[in-house]
Amino acid sequence: MRIPNRVKIKNKWVEITYQEGFVCGKHFGTYDPNTHVITIAAELEGHKKLECFVHEIVHAISEIYGLKITERQTEGIDGPLTKIIEALLNQ
Ligand SMILES: [Zn+2]
């Protein structure tokens, strides 16, 4: 599946970039609230890539809307949301 190069959240453009061998702690992606850039490990594919994208998008939504969603909550949301997106794409 193709992940967009950028998405608009509220009034902010969030850019999606890729980096070889990118790991931030135990994660394969990051969202920078200062630059609004999501970086995803370039080696991720398929389900893992989409799940990482969704995870970082939840962080971006949380920050931009001031929702204060925790890492644990984000980890609880990303899996089910990814499955819903995949189900919609596979209709
Ligand atoms: Zn996270």
Image (spheres, grey):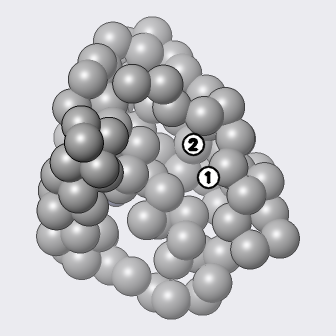
Q: Toward the viewer: 37 or 8?
A: 8
Q: In the figure, is residue 87 to the left or right of 43?
A: left
Location of residue 89 in the rendering, given as x and y in whole percent from the top left corner: 32, 40
- What SS does tag 1 mark? strand
Q: Decide: is 39 above or below 1.
A: below
Q: Quadrant of the C terminus?
A: top left
Q: Decide: is 85 above or below 27.
A: below
- Quarter-of-image position of residue 55: bottom left
Location of residue 71 in the rendering, given as x and y in whole percent from the top left corner: 29, 69
**Residue at horizontal 29%, vertical 50%?**
88
Q: Decide: is 42 above or below 30.
A: above
Residue that carries the numbered disc 2 in the rendered image: 38
- Quarter-of-image position of residue 53: top left
**Residue at horizontal 39%, vertical 82%?**
69
Q: Quadrant of the N terminus?
A: top left
In this view of the protein, can residue 22 be seen by the observer? no
Location of residue 8 in the rendering, given as x and y in whole percent from the top left corner: 73, 58
Specify the label residue 51 is tagged with. none
Q: Nearer the viewer, mark 2 or mark 1?
A: 2
Location of residue 78 in the rendering, given as x and y in whole percent from the top left corner: 25, 59
Q: In the figure, is residue 71 to the left or right of 8?
A: left
**Residue at horizontal 54%, vertical 51%?**
31
In the displayed image of the protein, which residue is found farthest to the front?
Answer: 91
Name the amino acid type tagged 2: Ile
Specify the label residue 32 is tagged with. 1
**First in sequence: mark 2 vs mark 1:** 1
The answer to whether the residue labelled 2 contacts the one labelled 1, judged by CB atoms less than 8 Å apart, is: yes
- Quarter-of-image position of residue 84: bottom left
